[in-house]
Amino acid sequence: MNIGVDARSLIEKKVGFGYFLENMLGEILELDRENTYFLFSDREIVSDVLKYKNVKTIIYKYDFFFKKSFYYYYRLPKFIDSMNIQLDVFWGTIHLMPKGLRSSVKKVLTIHDFTHLKFPKSTTKYNLLISKLFIGPSIRNSDEIICISDNTKKEMLEFYPKECTGKLITTIYEGGNRIIENIDYDKISGRVKKISDEPFVLFVGTIEPRKNIRVLLDIAPKLKGKMKVVICGKIGWESKEVVEKLRTTDNLEYLDYISNDEKMYLMKKTFCQIQPSLYEGFGLPVVESMQEGTIVIVANNSSLAELIEIDKLKFETSNPDDLVNKIEALLYDETVYCLAKQYCNRRALDFDWKKAAKKYLEIFAC
């Protein structure tokens, strides 16, 4: 089979979608050496998946009238035909399925979240426009839908009931960390190593409104003398005010974008990982941290409440004091700490890229 893949998220400095695709596609390619995978992107692809012999990269350029996602949605099928590429499957990896693919092509769409409907003010105007215009039609034009959590599946059926009619819908969890099995300590910067000399709690993610960084700004001074708050992540949109506070808040260390080796290093060293987001379709750092043997505390909402099931590791989203209380319970109550550690170690086993990849391959082949 020839399988087309939307690979636009495989850029050099990857964020959530890019990590998802590199991990999922990497495991798929480990299992499948027979089918050919065509990676379509309007920019350079930077990824370990390029090492596989059955991968071909197709870089296209959008035109004057149709740019970025508009070109992908409206013009990519014609471009594929012009290249005389005979696809059997097209995998829309991030919400969007191009319009006009041949009827002989099986169209498989991965849906991550519905931020544009749940928290429209927490995304850029451009992404909001693209989501509103194209997600509904993409669901309708796909043959099979893969949701990354049961919460995402529930929301899709709620928001797009007509588009989902007659569709095969499957939940497939992400697997956590696959890229780095052994940390290269030579690639860990001195600044990152220095942080691990004292106790700290950790957040990893893009700095943007939906990530609810303000809660971490609130708790940092309250934890002074107990542990530091460390925040790592690329600067996203509408974050100027938050970034200024990141650099001036007492008892807080901001590291900007960090490498995968550094991320895994900090996840191993931290007292606990915190995911305070207002909303997540999945929450990959939650699983990655648990797989590193780390306790995770999450905001009690969306798929986060699905990933972490016990109340002792969930705090009310807009309540910094509740988060401080949860951290202090782990710090001062050995029984609570041990039970939380056991739970996270056990829960980590429920997420596996190889199992997920096998399910994807089954869907591609049907």
Image (cartoon, rainbow, N blue to C red):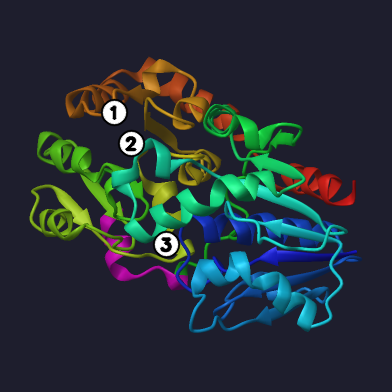
N-term mark: 2 or 3: 3
| Residue shown at the point (82%, 45%) measured from the top left | 363
Could you tell me residue 27's position as x and y percent?
73, 56
141 on left or right of 219? right
Inspect the image, locate mark 3, and give the three-letter code of the amino acid beneath it: Glu
Task: Identify the disc placed on residue 262.
Answer: 3
The amino acid marked with disc number 1 is Thr
Give the residue displayed 8% in from the left and 48% down from the top. 250
- Mark 3 is surrounded, within 10 Å at the Cα level, by few (under 14), some (14 to 19) or many (20 or more) other residues, namely many
Determine whether label 2 and label 1 are within 8 Å by CB: yes
Q: CA distance from mark 3 to mark 1?
A: 27 Å
Q: Is residue 195 magenta?
A: yes
SS class of the residue under badge 2? loop
Q: What is the magenta range?
A: 186-196
Q: Earlier in the sequence, mark 3 or mark 1?
A: 3
| Residue designated by label 1 | 317
